Image (cartoon, rainbow, N blue to C red):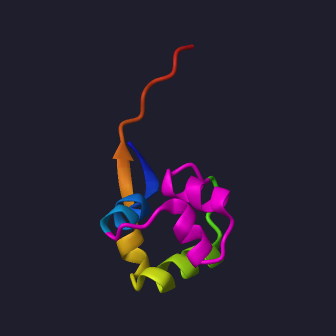
Amino acid sequence: MSVVLRTRLKRILEQRGLSIRGFARMIDYRYESVRQFVNNESVQIPVELVERICEALNIDVSDLFYLERKEKTETAR
């Protein structure tokens, strides 16, 4: 079994009626980086981005992330 770090930011923004583009402007961060983060496409997550998100939304890091457990599939040889 493998574990993948995922973000809840998409759901949080939807609940608050915020668009990704508008939120990126609000936290003064590059739209494409925020979009990748929202869609769980980021390979590396800058600490500065996480800090800005948590501060702007008044949430804790534990509200932003969760671990998704996945079954490992055997690769064909």
Q: Is residue 28 above or below residue 8?
A: below
User: From this viewpoint, is residue 44 visible?
Assistant: no
**Where is residue 12, by image quadrant?**
bottom left
Q: Position of residue 10 (x, y in %)?
A: 41, 59
Q: Position of residue 60 (x, y in %)?
A: 40, 82
Residue at x-position 35% and y-position 48%: 69
Of residues 22 and 39, the one nearer the viewer is 22
Q: Is residue 60 above or below residue 69?
A: below
**Where is residue 7, by image quadrant?**
bottom left
Residue at x-position 38% and y-position 75%: 62
Of residues 30 and 19, the one nearer the viewer is 19
Q: Is residue 39 above or below residue 75?
A: below
Q: Is residue 24 magenta?
A: yes
Residue at x-position 65% and y-position 76%: 28
Q: Position of residue 58 (x, y in %)?
A: 41, 86
Q: Residue 23 vs residue 33: left or right?
A: left
Q: Which residues are magenta?
A: 16-42
**Where is residue 25, by image quadrant?**
bottom right
Q: Position of residue 31 (x, y in %)?
A: 64, 61
Q: Name, please, the residue furthest toward the left.
A: 15
Q: Quadrant of the C terminus?
A: top right
